[in-house]
Amino acid sequence: MIIVCPHCQSNRIVTKDTAKKTCGLLGVVGGAAGGTTGVLRGAEIGADVGKMAGPFGMTVGMIGGAILAALIGGATGAVAGAQLGEVIDDTILDNYQCLDCDYVFSQKLS
Ligand SMILES: [Zn+2]
């Protein structure tokens, strides 16, 4: 799809993706925080696995499991946030900017 500036008909258009970036970041934080259950479960599994290596292994396994679960939660949240942000960018915000005349517009107007 070629997007053309409604003001000067230039095709040198960039997307700003403001909401996509913001929501993606919020998704990381929310996903990591919301994944508390996953973090606890990850710590449990990690502790079980590490048990074979003694008390030290259990601690390392627990921390590793918790971090891994938080990362997975954060990544899932980031994807969900970015998708939501994309919708906001496309429908609510003026996501497109013309590099030739600096005109800012949304896709619906073109
Ligand atoms: Zn233009």
Image (cartoon, helix red, strand yellow):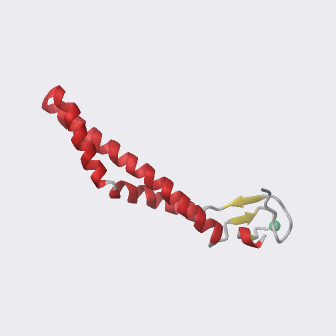
Q: Position of residue 84 (x, y in %)?
A: 53, 63
Q: Quadrant of residue 64?
A: top left
Q: Position of residue 98 (x, y in %)?
A: 77, 64
Quarter holding ligand 1 = bottom right
Residue at 56% across, 65% down: 19
Residue at 55% across, 63% down: 85
**Furthest residue toward right:** 9
Q: Is residue 74 visible?
A: yes
Q: Position of residue 27 (x, y in %)?
A: 45, 58
Left or right of residue 8, residue 22 in this image: left
Residue at 62% across, 73% down: 92
Residue at 76% across, 60% down: 13
Query: Considering only vertical position in the picture, is 37 above or below 103?
Result: above
The C terminus sits in image quarter: bottom right
Left or right of residue 24, residue 51 in this image: left
Q: Position of residue 43 (x, y in %)?
A: 24, 43
**Furthest residue toward top:** 53
Q: Quadrant of residue 18?
A: bottom right
Q: Nearer the viewer, residue 58 or 14?
A: 58
Query: Considering only vertical position in the picture, is 97 above or below 79?
Result: below
Left or right of residue 79, residue 86 in this image: right
Q: Is residue 105 visible?
A: no
The N terminus sits in image quarter: bottom right
Q: How many marks?
A: 0
Q: Quadrant of residue 10?
A: bottom right
